[in-house]
Amino acid sequence: MLLRWQLLGIISFILLWEIGALLVKSDLILPSPARVAKALYQLFGKNFFWLSIGGSFLRVFEAFILSGLIGLATGTMSGIKPQARAFLNPFIVGIRATPVMALILVAMFWFPAWQVPVFSAILMAFPVMHTSTEAGVHAVDKKLLEMSTFFNVPSSFIFWRLRLPSALPYILSGAKNALGLSWKVVVAGEVLSQPRMALGTGMQEARLSIETATVFAWAIITIFLCGLSEYLFGLLADRLSARFQQSSQEEDQDLS
């Protein structure tokens, strides 16, 4: 039933797009869906298109992994140690308040073109993972922690059986958001820094050539890849969470 509504939403959007294109009557300003579809079909036959997808994907993957690892480490420390939270909080707030474009432009002075999108995406996505991890660590039942401390329960047991199960939903949700943000920031960085083999570079070159339909085609591919990666990660996260819960229940049965 929900799938029908999703399809209806897509069809409605395309119809509104077509009506807007008919009213504007200029492919330079707003090309029709058919014109964009033709431009997208033409891109499929170019090697540069597929190499650009691969290049952007690798940058997104690198930024996602590094921002995730950093956010997990700092978020865990902030969740456990109030001193670490107070120390890191100004840095996190400062990054969140920094405009993405300003960060990319500054990074262009520091790094070669292919590293600018990765660096920018790490800085923008890592606070998302940090905040989610910190919230997850705080979500653990304080009474269980106090009881574990009273009975001298090993720290490893507390981490794997108390903190991680409570934090895992927050971490997975933060990781999904960080993945989508990584795509957006990486492509934005590519538009400005123009590394070789990049979706943003193709988009910028099409803009300079005044090929509006091709710009739309590059943008649609970026949206599709971002949505697809978030969807697949959501499936993986659901399986991981279910498997972890099943493993915890089996261990509880063994202990009892």
Image (spheres, grey):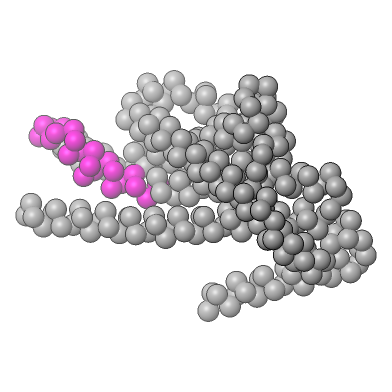
Which residue is located at x 84 percent, y 62 percent? 31
Which residue is located at x 46 percent, y 45 percent? 174
Choose top left, top right, bottom left or bottom right for residue 77. Answer: top left
The answer to which of 44 and 124 lies nearer the viewer is 44
Vertical side of 227 occupied by 33: above or below: below
**One can see residue 176 in this view:** yes
Choose top left, top right, bottom left or bottom right for residue 56. Answer: top right
The answer to which of 195 and 48 lies nearer the viewer is 48
Q: Relative to 177, is 78 on the left or the right?
A: left
Which residue is located at x 70 percent, y 28 percent? 105
The answer to which of 201 and 138 lies nearer the viewer is 201
**One can see residue 96 in this view:** no
Quarter of the figure with the C terminus: bottom left
Residue 126 location in percent, x, y?
Answer: 49, 35
Q: Relative to 37, is 152 on the left or the right?
A: left
Residue 233 location in percent, x, y?
Answer: 45, 55
Residue furthest left as drawn: 256
Residue 87 location in percent, x, y?
Answer: 44, 20
Q: Relative to 128, is 49 on the left or the right?
A: right
Q: Relative to 205, is 2 on the left or the right?
A: left
Choose top left, top right, bottom left or bottom right for residue 250. Answer: bottom left
Magenta span dominant secondary structure: helix
Q: Magenta residues, as a range?
A: 149-170
Which residue is located at x 14 percent, y 53 percent? 251
70 falls in the magenta region: no
Vertical side of 120 occupied by 30: above or below: below
163 falls in the magenta region: yes
Residue furthest right as drawn: 25
